[in-house]
Image: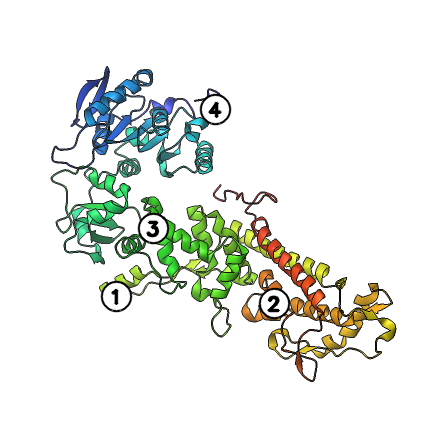
Amino acid sequence: MSNTSPVLAGPIGDCCVRGVQHTGTPAGKTITLAGVETYVAEPPASVSGTKKVVLFYADVFGPLHVNAHNEAEFDRMAWFEKSRTQAKNAIPKWFSAVKEIYGADAQYSAVGYCFGAPYVLEAIATEDVVAGAFAHPAGLTEDHFRNVKKPLLLSCAEVDHTFPIESRRRAEDILVEIKATYHIQVFSGVAHGFATRGNPDVENELVHAMGLVQDTRKAPLPPERFSNLLRSDFWFGDGNIVIIAGSAAFKVHRGQLERHSEIFSDLFAVPQPLDQDLIDGCPFVELQDSPSDVFYFLSALYDGLYFKHPRSIDFVAIAAVLRLSTKYVVEHLRQRCLARLNKDWPTTLMEWDAREQRCTDENSRYVPREHLAHPILVIELALDMNLSTILPAALYDLSRYGPSKIMAGTTYPTTRFDRMIADIYGLPKPVETPARLGREMLCRTLRGREATQRHMATFIAKELHCRSPSNACHNRVDRSAAPESDSASISSTTPSTSVDTASVSSTTTASAQVGANVPSTSTNRACHESFYFIMLNILRSVGGIACGRDADPLYTLVQATEMLSRTDFSDGQRQCGLKLCQACKTDFAASATKARQEVWTLLPQWFGLTEGDKEGSFLDLND
C-alpha cells in the first residue's frame, strides 16, 4: 500500500471514541488465538452445510467491549482484535489459527467498523476471503479501494466527518473504474459510530443499526402484522421459507433460491433462535425490495424469463428482474435482461435499423410503443443501474417527440403483481402514476434534439442546396444542343412526398439559380431539379410528421435515400422516378449514408453523455 496514496477516510477522531454503552450478556466466549484474545460466537451444533466464518475487525473500543460482543451475536460469528497495532502485527498468524479451527474449505468474509475497516480492504485484496463489508470507516486511502478484488458492502453514515460525502463519492468512482462488485448504503439521520455505538433509545439509530446487521431475532416482525400480509400466488404448500417484501408474502423453497444465489445461501445459513416467530410454520426473511420486483424475480427463478412475442409491457418484468438479479448476484438472469435491453436500445446503427424495422407492422405503420417501453422509463432504469451504453438510443428515441410531449412525460405501467393482488383481494384497480424526467435530463434531451436539427440543417445546406452534380453526371450535355423548353416538373401522388403548385412552379427558378455555377457549355437540369425536390420534402418532413418522427434525422436521411429508387412520383401524365442519373444517385446515397453514421456517432456528445468529443467514455451522471 503506497504511503502517498490520497486519504479518503481520515484517522480516528472524537466521533470515534464517543458512544453509548450497551447492556446485555455476551453469549459467546473469549479464547486466545495466536496470542490474541478473540471473542467467538458460534451457531448451534445442529447447523449443517458449508462453514461460513465472519472475521470481525472491531472499532477503537476493541473486541472485548460489550457492544462488540452484542454485535458479534448479531452476525453469529466474529473475531475481534484488541488494538490496531496488535491486529496489524498479529492478523496473519491469527487468521492461520482461525483456519486451523474451521478449515481451509470454509468460506471466510471480513467485517470491520471504524479503524477496523482497513483490514477488511486488505483482506478483500487477496483470495483469503469471499467478500467484505465495513461501516463508518477510518484510515482508508485510494489504494485500499483500487486493490479491491472481492465484493464489498459499504455502510455509511449520512453525517461522517471521518468519511465525508466527497470521499464516499471518490471511493465509488474508483470502484466503478476498476469494475468492482460493490453495494453502497447510506443511513439517514445518523453519524459516525451508529452501527456499534448508537443510542438504542433513539428510534432512528436503533432501526438503522438493526437494519445493518439484519437480525430477525433482535428485530422480529410483530405477530399482529402476519395476519395483514397479502399472499401472492407464489405460496407453495410444500414451501419452507417465507419471503416478505412490503405487505406481501411469498412462501417458496429455500433450495430454489440457494441454487441460484449465494447471497440467499449465506442469508439462510445464519442460525436462528429456536423460539423465533414463524409464518405458516416456516421461518421468514424480510427483503427491502418492492413486492412487485420480488414477484417478477421469483417468476424468473421458477419459470424462466422468456418472451414469445416481445412487447413493451415486458419492460416491467425486465427492469424488476435486472434490479434483483444484480442485487442478489443471479448472473444468468442479469445477462438475459441486459441482452434484451441491448437489443431494444442498441449501440450500433445497424442494430438500430433492425430495431426500427421490428417496430414497423405489416401495414408499414411505425408503432414503437407497442414493442418498446417509453424511453423515459428506460432512461430512469439506465441511471439507476449505471447502464450508460443504452442511454444514447433512449435519449434519441425520446428526442423525436415534440418538446411538449417530452416535458409531459409518461406514466409508470401497472404491474401484473399489482393487478393480481387487486383481483384476489377485491382492492381498487391500481392507478398509473406520472413519470417525468428530472430537470437535468430534460435539458440534456432538449439540447440533444436541437443538435440533431442543426446537423440536419447543415446536411441540407451542404449536400442538397447548391449541390453540384457528380463529375460523371450522365445528364451533363452541351447547352447548345439542349431544348429551350423546361423539363417536366415532378409532383408526388403520395401524401408523404406531395409538392404543391407553388413549389413546383418555383422549381425552374431555383434550378436556374442552383445551376449558376455550372459551366455554360453544359446543363444538369434534371439532376438539379431532383435534388431540389428531395430538399423540399426533407424541409417539410412530411413523412416524419405523419409518423411522429419530425425530429428524426436517421429516418429523414433514409427517406431521402429511398427517393432515389422510388417510382411512384408523377410528371403530370404518368408515374415515374426522379430524373437523377445513376452517377448522381450513387454520390448522394454515399453522402446520406455517411451523414447517418455521423449522427449515430455524435449522439452521446449531443446528449451530454461524453466529455467533449471523446468517444466510448461516458460521464458519471450520478454525481
Above or below for 430 versus 194:
below
For label 1, the crowd category at 10 Å Cα-Cα, with few meaning under 14, some 14 to 19 and many 20 or more, is: few
Assign a secondary structure to mark 4: loop
| Residue tagged 2 | 559
Look at discs 4 and 1 and give the one toward the viewer. Answer: 4
Q: What's the CA distance linking mark 2 and mark 4?
A: 57 Å
**Residue 5 tag number:** 4
Q: Residue at x 45, y 65 (%)?
A: 369
Q: What's the CA distance linking mark 1 and mark 2?
A: 48 Å
Q: What's the CA distance linking mark 4 and mark 3?
A: 38 Å
| Residue tagged 1 | 423
- The amino acid on which the numbered mark 4 sits, given as a three-letter code, is Ser
Where is residue 542, by image quadrant? Answer: bottom right
Q: Would residue 247 be visible to someone looking at this image?
A: yes
Look at discs 3 and 1 and give the one toward the viewer. Answer: 3
Look at discs 4 and 3 and give the one toward the viewer. Answer: 3
Q: Nearer the viewer, residue 37 or 471?
A: 471
Q: Residue at x 66, y 60 (%)?
A: 590
* Tag 3–tag 1 contact (CB < 8 Å): no
| Residue tagged 3 | 333
Q: Position of residue 614 (x, y in %)?
A: 59, 43
Q: What's the CA distance linking mark 3 and mark 1?
A: 29 Å
Q: What's the CA distance linking mark 3 and mark 2?
A: 39 Å
Look at discs 2 and 4 and give the one toward the viewer. Answer: 2
- The amino acid on which the numbered mark 2 sits, given as a three-letter code, is Gln
Q: Would residue 163 be visible to someone looking at this image?
A: no
Q: Residue at x 50, y 42 (%)?
A: 620
Which one is earlier in the sequence, the residue at label 2 or at label 4? 4
For label 2, the crowd category at 10 Å Cα-Cα, with few meaning under 14, some 14 to 19 and many 20 or more, is: many
Q: Nearer the viewer, residue 168 or 542?
A: 542
Which one is earlier in the sequence, the residue at label 4 or at label 3? 4
Assign a secondary structure to mark 3: helix
